[in-house]
């Protein structure tokens, strides 16, 4: 499988580390032999080699600051932008650039270019799926290619695959969960007596929250993930404007203490049904499975007709955790390709 990787930050590097460290296992147990032919960043260079790039060389170069540090080899191309790299050819495009919840760009154009060039798409980037899921699905179907995006919701914890594949045959009537680790971490710290401002500062120091924490603390990141879940589970056509969104910025330590005294806990709950969705700070009884989810962990409960409630708890972010989400999609595509050749 020849892969181009757009975005070589936390997630892209996590994926490449996994591909390097598990190469023998993946070949033996999954019959998966990936070849990374292109890697693109915004400001730290880009590389393309039709015969594949050396994974260790890529990681060493980026850790030294730039892909320009990657050794010269015959046939190596440097400095191509994302579109040039996609057009040069591959079997799969992995997009791990920054998420834009308003336009999905520039990643959305990269997805369209990948399909036009006969490539499957794997996204860690939430933007294209949150903004244009139906258009992407229809173009992918027309091209006979797969669109996969497990890593966009709960990193590698298989929320999408559980809902769309393992629970196939069950009707899911609602999904509700804790889809943003930063806000859950802040709420957990506030329960331990910290103010909102101090808890946010600690989340930033630990790398959970961005310098501009708006997308997390005001609920937009959770809302985008809820929209992705609604699209995947219900084929819903929700946009951020359809979602009733409130973040945790206004919660005080008094609010948190009052909930605790009543045997409850504040959680930022994202929920979607086929009809719509919301993200709201919600007081959850301690007996509810979501109340026990603390720190940066994520969880989702699917309410189903045949199985009742199913709650999945796991990592919602992280280098290897999200890299694994991308890998799980690559493996599914690989399996499909192998089966189609039988
Ligand atoms: N980190 C997580 O735990 C996690 C979990 C789930 C989903 N995600 C999603 O996965 C994506 C990647 O996250 P990340 O944490 O890896 O971000 P990151 O560390 O900021 O890396 C982003 C990468 O994209 C590159 N890039 C930026 N603009 C680009 C453009 N126009 N064309 C090509 N490359 C471009 C950046 O280049 P430079 O190096 O030059 O800046 C960088 O290499 C995001 O959409 C994020 O929301 C992340």
Image (spheres, rainbow, N blue to C red):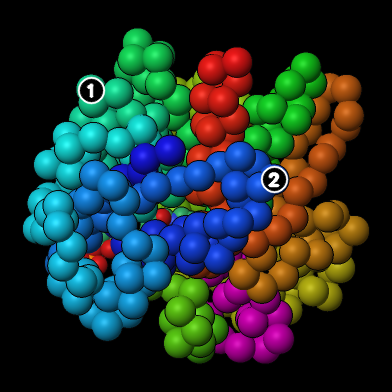
Which of discs 2 and 1 lies nearer the camera? The answer is 2
**Residue projecting furthest to the left:** 79
Pick out the residue farthest to the top.
142
Q: Is residue 62 magenta?
A: no
* Magenta span main SS: helix
Q: Residue at x 16, y 67 (%)?
A: 72
Give the structural element (helix, strand or loop) at label 2: helix
In this view, the residue in front, 39 or 232, is 39
User: How far across and how far down the image is residue 340, in percent?
Assistant: 55, 16
Mark 1, residue position: 116
Could you tell me which quadrant the N terminus lies in? top left
User: Farthest front residue?
Assistant: 74
Mark 1 neighbour density, 10 Å: few (under 14) some (14–19) many (20 or more):
some
The picture places residue 305, in percent across and down from the top left corner, at 84, 22
Reply yes or no: does residue 190 show up in magenta.
Answer: yes
The answer to whether residue 190 is left or right of residue 305 is left
Visible residue check, residue 224: no
Total numbered labels: 2
Residue for badge 2: 29
Location of ligand 1 given as a quarter of the image: bottom left
Residue shown at the point (53%, 61%) measured from the top left: 18
Say if residue 61 shows up in the picture.
yes
Place of residue 291 in the rendered image (x, y in percent of width and height, measured from the top left):
78, 61
Binning the other alpha carbons within 10 Å of mark 2 as few (below 14), some (14 to 19) or many (20 upward) gives few
Give the spatial CA distance, label 2 vs label 1.
32 Å
Question: In the drawing, what numbered circle is on residue 89?
Answer: none
Q: Foreground residue, 223 or 54? A: 54
Residue range of the region highlighted in magenta in the rendering:
181-197
The residue depicted at 23 percent of the width and 35 percent of the height is 89
- Tell me which label, 2 or 1, sits earlier in the chain: 2
Relative to 207, does residue 332 appear above or below in the rendering? above
């Amino acid at each position: 499988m020849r892969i181009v990787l757009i975005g070589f930050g936390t997630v892209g590097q996590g994926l490449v580390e996994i591909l390097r460290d598990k190469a023998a296992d993946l070949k033996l147990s999954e019959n998966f032999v990936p070849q990374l032919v292109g890697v693109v960043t915004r400001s730290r260079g880009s590389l393309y080699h039709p015969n594949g790039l050396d994974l260790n060389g890529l990681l060493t170069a980026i850790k030294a600051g730039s892909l320009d540090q990657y050794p010269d080899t015959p046939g190596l191309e440097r400095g191509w932008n994302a579109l040039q790299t996609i057009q040069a050819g591959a079997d799969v495009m992995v997009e791990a650039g920054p998420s834009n919840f308003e336009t999905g760009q520039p990643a959305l154009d990269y997805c369209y270019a990948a399909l036009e060039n006969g490539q499957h798409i794997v996204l860690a980037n939430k933007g294209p799926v949150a903004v244009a899921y139906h258009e992407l699905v229809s173009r992918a179907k027309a091209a006979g290619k797969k669109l996969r995006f497990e890593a966009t919701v709960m990193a590698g914890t298989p929320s999408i695959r559980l809902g769309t594949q393992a629970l196939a045959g069950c009707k899911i009537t609602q999904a509700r969960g804790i889809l943003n680790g930063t806000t859950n971490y802040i709420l957990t710290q506030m329960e331990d007596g910290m103010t909102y401002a101090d808890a946010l500062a600690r989340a930033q120091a630990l790398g959970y929250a961005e310098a501009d924490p708006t997308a997390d603390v005001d609920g937009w990141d959770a809302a985008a993930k809820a929209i992705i879940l609604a699209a995947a589970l219900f084929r819903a056509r929700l946009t951020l404007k359809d979602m009733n969104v409130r973040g945790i910025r206004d919660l005080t330590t008094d609010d948190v203490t009052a909930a605790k005294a009543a045997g409850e806990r504040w959680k930022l709950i994202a929920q979607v049904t086929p009809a719509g969705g919301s993200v709201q700070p919600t007081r959850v009884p301690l007996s509810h499975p979501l109340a026990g989810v603390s720190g940066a962990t994520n969880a989702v409960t699917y309410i189903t007709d045949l199985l009742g409630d199913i709650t999945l708890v796991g990592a919602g972010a992280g280098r290897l955790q999200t890299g694994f989400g991308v890998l799980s999609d690559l493996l599914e595509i690989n399996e499909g390709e192998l089966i189609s050749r039988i």
